[in-house]
Amino acid sequence: MRDKDILQKVLENTEVIKQNTSKLEEKNKKLQEELNEIEEKNEERKEQLREAQKSFKKIGCNVKEEVADKFEELAHKLNYLNTSAMCKAYLLLLLENKEYQKTFVEYSAVLKSESGEA
């Protein structure tokens, strides 16, 4: 009888293990599906980014090395990754903010008058 009870318990445990394994496999399958969806979305985003980048134009300027070094120091000081990121942020701010545009025009006028161009 004892063996029979042990055997019964083993069978019950085996059934529980099968059920748990089945549940885990189902969860695993769902997670894999979610992962696949995320990967597909990431690929779509990458493709959209590639397409969007085709419509961008590059603007920039050439400066002396010491000026570039000063800009790099300023970018680092302002916690930008690089001068390009800092310049982009400033240019967008200038483009979107009327007060900055006004100040920029005034500053340009002062520079021109100081250099005798006015």
Image (cartoon, rainbow, N blue to C red):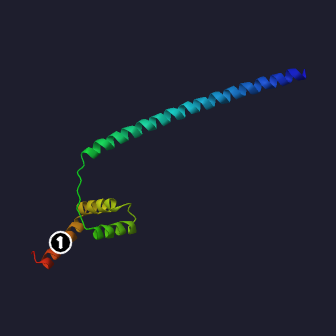
In this view, the residue in front, 45 or 77, is: 77
Left or right placement of residue 22 versus residue 61 in this view: right
Task: Say which residue label 1 marks.
Answer: 108
Residue 24, percent from left and from top: 62, 32
Above/below status of 25 relative to 97? above
- Residue lying at 18% horizontally and 73% vertically, measured from the top left: 106
Q: What count of labels does the image hold? A: 1
Q: Residue furthest front?
A: 65
Tell me what residue is drawn at x 58 percent, y 33 percent. Answer: 27
Viewport quadrant of the N terminus: top right
Q: Which of 39/73 is in front?
A: 73
Q: Quadrant of residue 5?
A: top right
Q: Hey, which quadrant is residue 92 in on the image?
A: bottom left
Indicate the position of residue 29 as horizontal and vertical percent values.
55, 30
Q: Residue at x 76, y 25 (%)?
A: 12
**For residue 39, what is the image quadrant?**
top left
The residue sitting at the right extreme is 1
Instruction: Quadrant for the C terminus, please.
Output: bottom left
